[in-house]
Amino acid sequence: MRYELVIFDNDGVLVDSEPLANRILAAYLTELGHPTTYEDSLRDYMGSAVHRVHDLVRERTGRRLPDDFDATLHQRTFAAFRRALRPVAGVAEVLEKLAADGVPYCVASSGTHERIRVALRTTGLYDRFDERHLFSSQDVGRGKPAPDLFLHAAASMGVPADRCAVVEDSPLGVQAARAAGMDVYGFAAMTPLDRLDGASAHFRTMDELMSLLAG
């Protein structure tokens, strides 16, 4: 293994949450008078922290979202997670192989700490992670595409940025990893390859990932 740390995004990489979460977000924005399709949500918000939703809505309409927007969105999203969320196929085997090989790994997600934990517990992946190795954009203030979150995760794990590999499925995540000076592997299961431009390599199934990481 040529890397000393593998950093996983959560939504869409560890857990198959993007379809659920983006349908809920699109429906809620539309309900509030900001017509948004599922495709719009994927294009504009996939991989981002919730502050990006506030920023884009205000930029485009001059209107602010309700004060309880985040709380309501999270309530609806977590309820859907508990009903239907599943792990990404093959990711448990990837984590098992990394652990067996003694390669450290962690999560660095735009989602809140609560969202990360709800998702991992619901899908049975939580016990595969050290609690100290779950990093959220809440920890740094600026979410992806800023590099802050990935740099914070690497520093917390004691690994230089150029010895890290990032596994991402969103354009914003790829941009953030590149800005952090890290190699990034683009998971193209549901994201078109051209939207993951800049990734070191692309893969469509988790069983391809270990050979990419091994180089």
Image (cartoon, grey):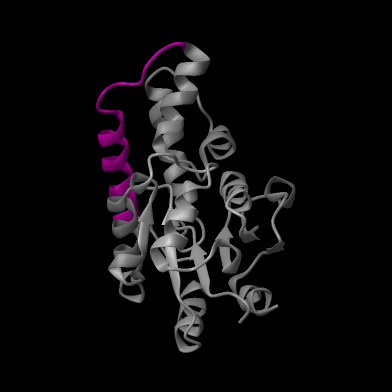
Q: Picture coordinates of residue 68 (x, y %)?
A: 25, 27
Report the residue at 58% width, 69% height from top. 163
Residue sitting nearer the eye, 48 or 69: 48
As for residue 69 lying within the magenta part, the answer is yes
Residue sitting nearer the eye, 14 or 123: 14
Q: Picture coordinates of residue 212 (x, y %)?
A: 68, 74
Residue sitting nearer the eye, 171 or 3: 3
Chain part drawn in magenta: 62-82
Instruction: Locate the C terminus and report the quarter of the image it occupies.
Output: bottom right
84 sits to left or right of 89: left
Q: Report the number of discs.
A: 0
Q: Can residue 49 be seen?
A: yes
Q: Can residue 83 be seen?
A: no
As for residue 78 lying within the magenta part, the answer is yes
Report the residue at 47% width, 58% height from top. 16
Report the residue at 34% width, 56% height from top. 116
Quadrant of residue 157 in the image?
A: bottom left
Q: Is residue 148 above or below residue 69?
A: below
Q: Picture coordinates of residue 131 (x, y %)?
A: 28, 67
Q: Is residue 121 above or below residue 190?
A: below
Q: Is residue 141 above or below residue 150?
A: above
158 sits to left or right of 2: left
Instruction: Locate the N terminus and report the quarter of the image it occupies.
Output: bottom right
Residue sitting nearer the eye, 36 or 100: 100
Q: Main secondary structure of the magenta part?
A: helix
Farthest top residue?
62
